[in-house]
Amino acid sequence: MKSIDEMLYSLSKSKFRSRFHLKDKEYVKNKGLKVIERHAYELLKTRLAPAVIPNDGKQTPMRGHPVFLAEHATATCCRNCLFKWYKIPKGRALTEQELDYIVSIIMAWIKKEMETHEK
């Protein structure tokens, strides 16, 4: 797997992925990064990690939580995107290592967005 920095750089070159920007900065500030990270694990365990996802490709809303937007920005929104960008195959549950990696990328994107928008 690519490093998180390499992955974020690759995603920033995508016209589609690079158009996403964090809008819920106040929510992130109020909840704190630890809580957002816990939410990311909880959301991904039910929406992305299972081997079979009945509504795969449609399970991640575009708004409602900063993690949702981060999933689209980091191509971790569905199993098709996970395969295309990360070569993580469909049809099997995510490993703990894969889940940790995905959450790390999501959190790195959120942190970067928070820093960018604070300047």
Image (tube, grey):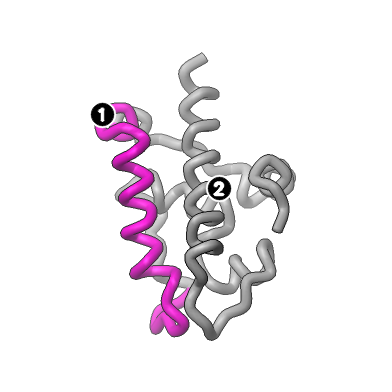
What amino acid type is highlighted by mark number 1?
A: Asn
Residue stretch in magenta: 27-56
* 71 with respect to 18 (left or right): left
- At numbered mark 2, what does the secondary structure look like: helix, strand or loop? helix
Q: CA distance from mark 2 to mark 1?
A: 21 Å
- Write down the residue under mark 1: 30
> Is 39 included in the stretch rendered in magenta?
yes
Residue 84 shown left or right of residue 117 in the figure: right
- Residue for point 68% across, 69% down: 87
Which x, y percent locates residue 84? Answer: 68, 68
Callout 1 environment at 10 Å: few (<14), some (14 to 19), or many (20+)? few
Name the residue tied to disc 2: 105
- Percent of width and height locating residue 3: 69, 47
What kind of secondary structure does the magenta stretch mostly adopt? helix
Horizontal side of 109 relative to 58 (left or right) equals right
Residue 62 in the image, given as x and y percentages of width and height: 41, 54
Residue 62 against residue 44 in the figure, above or below: above
The residue located at (57%, 51%) in the rendering is: 74
